[in-house]
């Protein structure tokens, strides 16, 4: 029933001009037949002219619509940033547009794809992004027993979302546990943790969790009323590369521009690899010996993306 009603409604809409003009002519003829009293005939005649005017107006509107004049104006309004900003259903609107883009292509995974993009890669969990991220790894020694000793320095700017005044800085690193029976003790020594150059290491909230295979250390701090601020940390580490020869760094927030520098002794072989990034890191300073330099300036690094390096002895 509803389907039939919809078809009738569309037919009337598409033929509205002719319906109004035909109705107008019918009323005019009716007023000339002298069926009613003179006052009624005059009223019907005026009504016929009004209906005819409506028909002409409808014809003009249809013509303008056909030419796209109203369409362009309406689109310029509903697609404007100001209109979208005032909407209370922006999430629903985004999901609807996304479904229209790729649901036909990926009907089985469109819902999961939508959730991952919206929850993980839109800046919702974090109220900030990182800028000018610098990772410097200075490997001081690799002993014959496979013990690697290095300093790691991380520096980045935190840029707050407009209107946000509180940033919860959360970071974590994990190290594989030594093999059973190993006599070597893993060293993870944090030297400092600075906000805008001020060391707040002693004030960090730290938590350590041990799983079957690794030890995970998490740190937290809160920064207030700073639209842009810097974070810098330095760690000294020692462990056996025969038990863990891969080091991975992933960012926890959207990152704009990252530079990586790794220096190492002459008895080492070090390999750099990309993790998940859409545009790969570029090689820079390629003329330096025992040094790997990479730069990512084209595009953004998304959460859980970054880089990794593997260690080994150089073959003689």
Image (tube, rainbow, N blue to C red):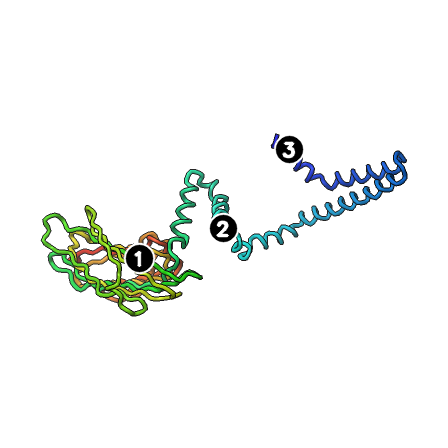
271 or 78, which is in the foreground? Answer: 78
> Residue placed at 88% from the left, 41% from the top?
39
Q: Which element carries disc 2, helix, strand or loop?
A: helix
Residue identified by numbered label 1: 170
Q: Which residue is label 3 attached to?
A: 5
Instruction: Tell me the distance, in whole angstroms, between the alpha carbons under discs 1 and 3.
Output: 58 Å
Q: Is residue 303 above or below residue 261?
A: above
Q: x, y percentage for residue 163?
A: 44, 61
Q: Kindly indicate whether the residue at mark 3 contacts the one at mark 1 (C-beta within 8 angstroms).
A: no
- For the C terminus, the quadrant is bottom left
Residue 90: image tag: 2
Q: In this view, does 209 lie above or below 190?
A: above
- Identify the element where label 1 is drawn: strand
The quarter of the rendered structure image containing the N terminus is top right
Q: Which residue is drawn at 28% across and 55% down?
A: 273
Mark 2 → mark 3, Cα distance in angstroms: 32 Å
């Amino acid at each position: 029933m509803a389907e039939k009603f919809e078809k009738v409604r569309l037919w009337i809409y598409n033929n509205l001009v002719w319906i109004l003009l035909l109705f107008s002519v019918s009323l005019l003829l009716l007023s000339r037949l002298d069926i009613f009293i003179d006052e009624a005939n005059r009223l019907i005649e005026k009504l016929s002219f009004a209906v005819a005017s409506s028909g002409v107006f409808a014809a003009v509107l249809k013509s303008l619509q056909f030419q796209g004049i109203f369409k362009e104006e309406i689109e310029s309004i509903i697609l404007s940033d100001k209109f979208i900003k005032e909407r209370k259903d922006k999430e629903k609107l985004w999901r609807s547009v996304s479904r229209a883009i790729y649901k036909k292509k990926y009907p089985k995974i469109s819902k999961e794809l939508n959730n991952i993009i919206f929850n993980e890669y839109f800046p919702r969990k974090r109220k900030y992004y990182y800028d000018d991220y610098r990772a410097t790894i200075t490997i001081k020694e690799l002993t014959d027993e496979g013990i690697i000793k290095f300093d790691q320095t991380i520096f980045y700017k935190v840029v707050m979302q407009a209107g946000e005044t509180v940033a919860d800085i959360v970071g974590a690193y994990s190290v594989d546990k030594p093999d059973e029976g190993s006599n070597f003790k893993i060293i993870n020594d944090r030297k400092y943790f600075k906000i805008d150059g001020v060391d707040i290491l002693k004030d960090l909230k730290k938590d350590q969790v041990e799983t079957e295979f690794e030890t995970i250390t998490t740190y937290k701090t809160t920064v207030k009323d700073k639209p842009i601020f810097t974070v810098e940390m330095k760690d000294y580490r020692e462990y056996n590369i025969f038990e863990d020869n891969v080091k991975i760094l992933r960012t926890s927030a959207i990152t704009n521009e990252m530079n990586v520098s790794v220096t190492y002794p002459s008895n080492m072989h070090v390999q750099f690899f990309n993790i998940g990034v859409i545009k790969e890191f570029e090689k820079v300073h390629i003329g330096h010996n025992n040094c790997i330099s990479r730069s990512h300036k084209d595009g953004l690094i998304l959460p859980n993306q970054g880089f990794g390096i593997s260690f080994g002895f150089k073959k003689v």
